[in-house]
Amino acid sequence: MTEEILVRTARLEDAPALVRFNRAMALETEQKDLPLEIVTAGVDRLLRNPQLGYYVVAEVGTEIAGSLMITFEWSDWRNALYWWIQSVYIRPEFRQRGFYRRLYRHVKERAQGEGGVCGFRLYVEKENTAAQKVYETLGMSQSHYLMYEESL
């Protein structure tokens, strides 16, 4: 029996699950225990300000199995937006069952439908080879750019 997966844009009432997913992902992939108050405020801010981005969730029945976040980067070289895929999390019991594939396909179809999107970008921990394989299987390839940052 194939489970029916519903993929949709997240709503305000999904915030508690998104907060849990963000904190679980940071702990699992980077061994970071993110402060509940900051993550809660960050999720709420994005959900209330769609110009910053949006979350997409995958549901089975009444359970949210996973999610990802999209944020936007303007490219003057392309006269279009890159959509950054961030905060990807699939609950362990739902992994390797096609949930990320469905989320990715949903976002890709939305980008193609809206137009003005020149591509997707994401970053992944160097050690997270399982995620890297998934991204490559779906058609993404490693960029020639290195990422630098400075915290303020």
Image (cartoon, grey):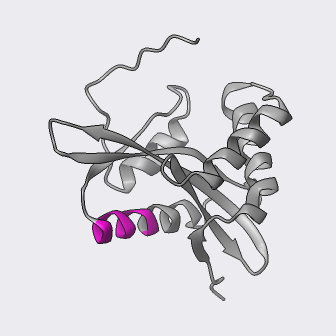
Res 95 seen here: no
Quadrant in which the N terminus is drawn:
bottom right
66 relative to 26, above or below: below
The location of residue 73, given as percent across then percent down, is 36, 39
The residue shown at (30%, 72%) is 113
The residue shown at (82%, 29%) is 35
The location of residue 91, given as percent across then percent down, is 73, 55
Quadrant in which the C terminus is drawn:
top right
Specify start and end residues of the magenta stretch as a single range: 106-114
Characterize the magenta stretch by its predominant secondary structure: helix
114 relative to 39, above or below: below
Res 84 seen here: yes
Q: Nearer the viewer, residue 141 or 11?
A: 11
The location of residue 24, given as percent across then percent down, is 77, 41
**Badge count:** 0
146 relative to 21, above or below: above
Is 86 on the left or on the right of 57, as rendered? left
Is 135 on the left or on the right of 74, as rendered? right
Q: Nearer the viewer, residue 33 or 47?
A: 47
The residue shown at (68%, 65%) is 11
Q: Nearer the viewer, residue 53 or 120?
A: 53
Q: Furthest-bottom residue in view? A: 1
The residue shown at (43%, 63%) is 107
Is residue 5 in the magenta section?
A: no
